[in-house]
Amino acid sequence: MHDRRTFLLTGGAAVAATLLPDALSGADADDGAAAFIKDHVSKLRPLEVQAGVAWWNANTTGKDEDFKKKEEAQNKIDEALSDKATFDCLKPLKAAADKGAIKDPLAARQIELLYLQYLEKQVPAELLKKITAKANAVEQTFNVYRAKVDGQEIADSKVRSTLKESTDSALRQKVWDASKGVGAAVEADLAELVKLRNEAATQLGFKNFHALQLALNEQDGGELVKLFDDLDALTKEPFTKAKADIDARLAKKLGVKVEDLMPWHYHDPFFQESPAVFDANLDSPFKAADIPALCSTFYAGIGLPIDDVLGRSDLYEKKGKSPHAFCTDIDREGDVRVLANIVPNEYWMGTMLHELGHSVYSSKNIPQALPYVLRAEAHILTTEGVAMQFERFSKSRAWLEKMGVKVDEPQAFDEAAAKTQRNQLLIFSRWCQVMLRFEKAMYENPKQDLNALWWDLVETYQQVKKPKGRSAPDYGAKIHICSAPVYYHNYMMGQLFASQVHHALSKDVFNTDPKQTIYIGEKKVGEFMKKKVFEPGRTKTWKELTRFATGEDLSPKAFAKDFQG
């Protein structure tokens, strides 16, 4: 038996592993868990805040010195989490939690989560530093990369607008190809990063990094593949029909034959969004709109104000800044910020609703009374789900008009928006199939021809033709593969969660058809979201939270109703 007093006095972090049993019981378990959690928070909380600020600064400036600080901050966290003596103290507490010996459910849940957090870092310090340095270098390359066409550098927004508006196929091809150039720029670093990540995973006893990440996120690989197989069967036929209609419209607009359509003829570099092929222009209502102001009014109206978030955010394009969008919670005490690159169109209206949806599901509305470890979103799929739930309103005429935005030709807008929204759900589901299956295969066999693998999956699931003779690392142009690995499947699961929560909210708050529910000015929406989704924080697993919020397990049923018209 170990000396319980010694264990408690040292906070659990300095006790030699030889003095610890395989599992603790009784008062030892409860007191040991409390001591360990207190010790962890005192050490990691300031490091995590420091890293959050450093990450924000690096992404808003793109400066070498800020990326260096970001890397140093992450190294400090990794050093703390990789400490073997600390992990040896955590293992018997995890065993006690598994056996129900820790009576405080909040303490038991924290131990479960902390075990996963520490487990990932139980590899040599030098390996962790190599991974961080390489990931940092890749991320910086993305931040500073700008596509070049005919020697001229163009912003990401210009890439998007050209692919959306130009009828010049030759120009479209140049812009599309230039946008993929970042893939070649990061190819070697990404290959090394995959190797390092796999090395860390195998040292921890996992087959590869993909399997490790699923385990760390409390997800089962077999269940995940089955879910995506079910989605494939559910969406293949309606997607094929929808794409045939899209292709016919695109071909007519661009003056090419349907059989000659290539990746650059679609309006998004990855065909992850629905092309604007219908008569109504979904961007026109936003040309003179103040997008942040619309978001402010909307979220305040449902009892989830975000003006403080907007005040801390960085919302418009500038050199060196990340060209993408994200929301980050710096300290779990309300310092929540959004990075964006707003231009006045529907894409950025939806993106801002999305990112600010993340912001309201954060420490702004997760009770401060919850312990620090549990004061975060239940899971990445649930926060993505909430963001997607709010994002969908950018294509709703009823929502726009109630928000005071004039919509010209409302009937045409309605028809275009409804078809675009339906197509969007289908297109996104097929794109997520590519991302899940590519990452899984890449980490299982990184030495295979990844260029060929990528296009095989694109042709199979998205039905987009590979350019003749093309062999380029186009997969590397997707930032998530590099900087947010084994994450993307959560977007699709988030779509399922979004539909399911929206249907439950429509029934419980409005008693209306989900397709007619638009939330505006109804503070009961905020009350529902707080009680059913936000306030539990991480006290529940994502499966438990889904059942708590919607009364059912996560499934494609509600999602299917949303895209079936």
Image (tube, grey):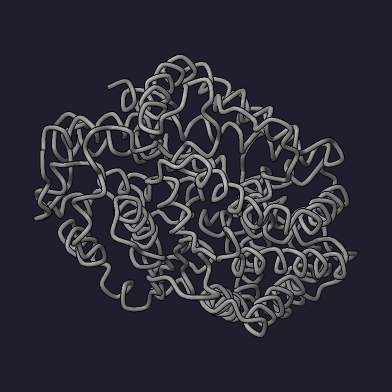
Quick check: can you spot residue 132? Answer: yes
State whether residue 306 is above or below residue 558: below
Pick whichever, 463 or 435, lies toward us.
463
Q: Vertical placement of 209 versus 352: above or below?
A: above
Q: Quadrant of residue 293?
A: bottom left
Q: Is residue 497 above or below residue 229?
A: below
Instruction: Residue at 42%, 34% (x, y): give it.
Output: 496
Whole-percent x, y for residue 301 in the image:
15, 59
Horizontal side of 19 relative to 236 (left or right) equals right
Please give the name of the residue rendered at 16% of the width and 41% of the height, measured from the top-left corner: 509
Q: Is residue 334 left or right of residue 198?
A: left
Is residue 557 depicted above or below 31 in this figure?
Answer: above
Give the residue displayed 63% in from the left and 67% down from the top: 31
**Residue 68 vs residue 207: left or right?**
left
Q: Is 521 on the left or on the right of 268, as rendered? A: left
Number of numbered discs visible in the structure rendering: 0
